[in-house]
Image: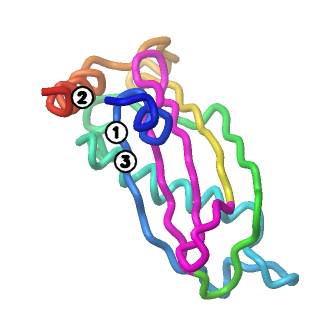
Amino acid sequence: MNMKSREVNGPYGLFAESDIVVEFFDCDPMQVVWHGNYLNYFEISRRALLEKIGYSYSEMEESGYAFPIIEIYAKYLEPLRHRDRARVKAVLTEYENRINIKYEIHNSQTGHLTTKGTSSQMTYNISTGSSCFVCPKVLTDKVEALVGAKRE
């Protein structure tokens, strides 16, 4: 993987992209997307990334773990408006001690980067009710299988 690819697609080359259309109910009285709804767009792409890894929310629960968000950051660069089309990209940047994901939202019509951000999710053992400070083997094995397949 070359350096430019690592910058764009993260250290593991694992990412997912989702297309969205801004709905009327996503907008505030100023007729732009309300700032909190960008986090919903991040979620759409995060879910797609986890499904690509093979560790969807239901698979997490079945394996005995939950991954609550412990930190989220968004930087708004340019607004999206009703009926704009956008592409949301989620890039895996860490999976061993927590799940860290980097996001970018581009306006599909203009190509402009409108929003960027990050999120961190910790591992929580559902049965014991305790926090874990490393990700479970079930997740790391799935990521490593995909990363290894990409490198071959």
The answer to whether 139 appears left or right of 92 in the picture is left
Q: Position of residue 128 (x, y in %)?
A: 42, 18
Using the image as rendered, state which of residue 145 and residue 2 is in the foreground: 2
Q: Measured along the vertical axis of the image, is residue 110 above or below residue 66? A: below
Q: Position of residue 86 (x, y in %)?
A: 54, 72
According to the picture, the residue beneath numbered tag 1 turns out to be 14
Q: Quadrant of residue 106?
A: bottom right
Q: Is residue 87 magenta?
A: yes
Dot 2 or dot 1: first in sequence order is 1
The local crowd at label 3, few if under 14, some if 14 to 19, many if 20 or more residues have their Cα within 10 Å, is many
Residue 44, position as x, y percentages in the image: 47, 60
Provide the residue designation for mark 3: 49
Q: Which residue is mark 2?
A: 147
**Where does the magenta region start and end?**
85-114
Amino acid of disc 2: Val
Distance from the alpha carbon under mark 2 to that under mark 1:
7 Å
**Above or below: residue 111 compared with residue 28:** above
Crowding at dot 1, Cα within 10 Å, few <14 / some 14-19 / many 20+, comes out as: many
Q: Residues within 10 Å of mark 2 (few under 14, many from 20)?
A: some
Name the colouring of the figure: rainbow
Q: Residue at x 28, y 40 (%)?
A: 55
Q: Nearer the viewer, residue 5 or 102?
A: 5
Sequence-first disc among 2 and 3: 3
Q: State the residue at coordinates (67%, 86%).
A: 82
Q: Nearer the viewer, mark 2 or mark 3?
A: 2
User: CB under 8 Å between callouts 2 and 1?
Assistant: yes
User: Which secondary structure, mark 1?
Assistant: loop
Q: Kindly state the secondary structure of the residue where label 2 is placed.
A: helix
